[in-house]
Amino acid sequence: MTITVYELDGVDDVRFSPYCWRTLMALKHKGIDDFERVPVSFRDRSPIAFSGQERIPVLVDGDHWVNDSWNIACYLEDAYPDGPALFGSDIGRSQAQFVNAWTQRIQNPGLINIVLWDAFQAVDPADRDWWREDREKMFGRIEDYKENQSEKLTAWRRDLDPLRMTLGDQPFLGGQAPAYVDYLVFGTFLFACYVGREDVIEADDSLQDWLGRLLDMFDGFARQAPKTMTSER
Ligand SMILES: N[C@@H](CCC(=O)N[C@@H](CS)C(=O)NCC(=O)O)C(=O)O
C-alpha cells in the first residue's frame, strides 16, 4: 500500500522543511520508495485537517496516520523492522532523541536567525502575506535579518564543532553507516541549501565530506531536489 507524506511547499515546488526531509530520508533508508509526496501550502492546511493539528510532516500508511517527524521515525522503525535500522537499538533511539532535541532547540533556531530573509523568498508568493504576518509576530521585521549575518554565521558555524569532532573519527553520526541521527542534522543543512544558502557551510569545512556522502545517498535523492535561487541578499 502506498505511503503518503504531506509536506510544506515553497516557490517553484521547492520543499525546504527540515522536518519533512528527515521523514523522506527515513523512508528511503527503510528501502521504501513507493510513497507519494503531497504538497501543503502555508496558508491552507486543510489537507492535513484529519490529523487535528497544523504541523507538517504527516505520514499516512494505509488507515494509520502519524504526525511529528520523531513519531514518524519511531513508527517506521517499528512497523518496518525488516528494513535497515534507523536507531539500531533502544539505546540508539534514546540517544537520537537527544539529537532531535538539539536540532529543534539549538541548530534550527540558530539557522533561522541567519536565513529568515532567504526563507521568506523561498515561500510561494501566494503564501508570503500569510508568512510575513505569522513570522513577524515571532521574529520581528523579516528585512532586519539581512543584517549582521557574518557575526551570526561565525558563531553558528563554531557551535557545529561537536559534529566535526565526531565525524573526524567516523563517516556518519550513526557510525560506519548512516542512521536517523544523520538525517536529523542533515535536514537542517538541506533547509539552508534549498532556501539558497548553501554557503552557511564553507566550501573547505570538513563537514562537506559528510554532507556529500548524504547528498549522494539513494541515487542523489536530496541532491536532485529543487532549490531556490535567492534573488536578493
Ligand atoms: N516537532 C515537529 C515540528 C514540525 C514543524 O515545525 N514543521 C514545520 C515545517 S518545517 C511546520 O509545520 N511549520 C508550519 C509553519 O511554519 O507555519 C516535527 O518534528 O515534525
Image (cartoon, grey):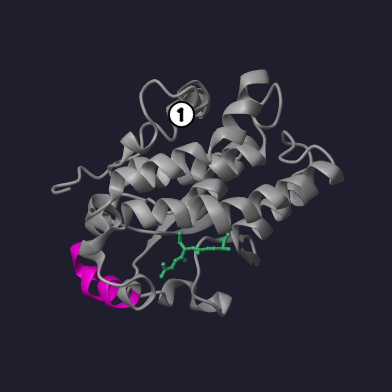
User: Could you tell me which residue is drawn at 75 percent across and 41 percent down?
Assistant: 87
Q: Residue furthest right?
A: 90
- In depth, the one of 212 and 36 nearer the eye is 212
Question: Which secondary structure dominates the residues rendered in magenta?
Answer: helix
Within 10 angstroms of label 1, few (less than 14), some, or many (20 or more) residues?
A: some
Q: How many marks?
A: 1
- In depth, the one of 144 and 90 nearer the eye is 144
Asked if residue 64 can be seen in this view, the reply is yes
Q: Which residues are magenta?
A: 125-134
- The reply, left or right, for residue 50 in relation to residue 9 is right
Relative to 107, residue 181 above or below: above
User: Could you tell me which residue is drawn at 71 percent across and 40 percent down?
Assistant: 86
- The reply, left or right, for residue 169 in relation to residue 46 is right
Asked which secondary structure carries label 1, the reply is helix
Kindly indicate the quadrant of the structure image that contains residue 119.
bottom left
Asked if residue 1 can be seen in this view, the reply is no
Specify whether tag 1 is near ligand 1 (CB below 8 Å): no
- The reply, left or right, for residue 87 in relation to residue 115 is right
Q: Was residue 127 drawn as part of the magenta stretch in this picture?
A: yes
Q: Was residue 96 drawn as part of the magenta stretch in this picture?
A: no
- Residue 106, x across and y down, in percent: 55, 54
- The reply, left or right, for residue 113 in relation to residue 209 is left
- Residue 187, x across and y down, in percent: 50, 44
Q: Amino acid at mark 1?
A: Leu
User: Could you tell me which residue is drawn at 37 percent across and 43 percent down?
Assistant: 153
- Residue 201, x across and y down, in percent: 39, 33
Kindly indicate the quadrant of the structure image that contains residue 169.
top right
Which residue bears the numbered disc 1? 215
Relative to 101, residue 156 above or below: above
- Residue 128, x across and y down, in percent: 23, 68
- In depth, the one of 120 and 214 nearer the eye is 120
